[in-house]
Image: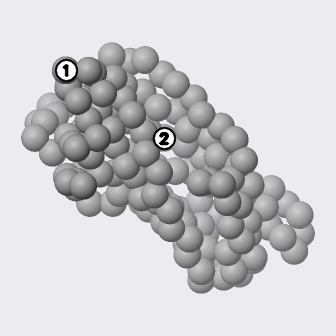
Amino acid sequence: MRVMLNRAPYEQATDGVVVRVTPTFLPDESDADDHRFVWAYTIEIENGTRDVVQLLSRFWRITDANGLVQTVEGPGVVGQQPVLRPGERFRYTSACPLTTPSGMMVGTYRMLRLETGARFDIAVPAFALDPPDVLRRAH
């Protein structure tokens, strides 16, 4: 399978938990004539706190180049609700099809501090889904 890496990872820290995202365009899974553009994205979550935390759920807002917004929410990620001890990392890869060549995603993860039972949200940084051959201009 051929992949085309996008830009360097996007990164954001919330309450000591760091989320890094690397989007990858999948040209072999995409078909411009069929208006199908598929993106993989690899997420790494690093627990920089002193607490043991668990990822409970996810929320995504996906916007295509036409401004069409889809939301996705549900328990865990890729069928898992990982527990991270201080200093541990969890990495997974998922995919997102679009009907336009470009778009963007942004989201949050609902987390749980296992010792106290406190729930908190961490931000997933907004990241562009732009094929490497597309030059974006600021408006």
> In the image, residue 94 lies at what x, y percent?
47, 51
Residue tagged 1: 33
Q: Amino acid at mark 1?
A: Asp
Q: Say few, some or many: other residues with alpha carbon within 10 Å of mark 2 (under 14 / 14 to 19 / 20 or more).
A: some
Q: Give the number of the disc on residue 106.
A: 2
Residue 116 position by quadrant: bottom right
Name of the residue lying farthest toward the right? 116
Is residue 19 or residue 34 the one in the foreground? 34
Residue in front for this viewpoint, 35 or 105: 35
Image quadrant containing the N terminus:
bottom left
Point 73% across, 65% down: residue: 54
Q: Looking at the image, which residue is at 64% across and 63% down?
A: 15
Q: Which mark is residue 72?
A: none
- The three-letter amino acid code for the residue at tag 2 is Val
CA distance for labels 2 and 1? 27 Å
Asked whether the residues under the numbered discs 2 and 1 touch, taking CB atoms below 8 Å apart as contact, a structural biologist would say no
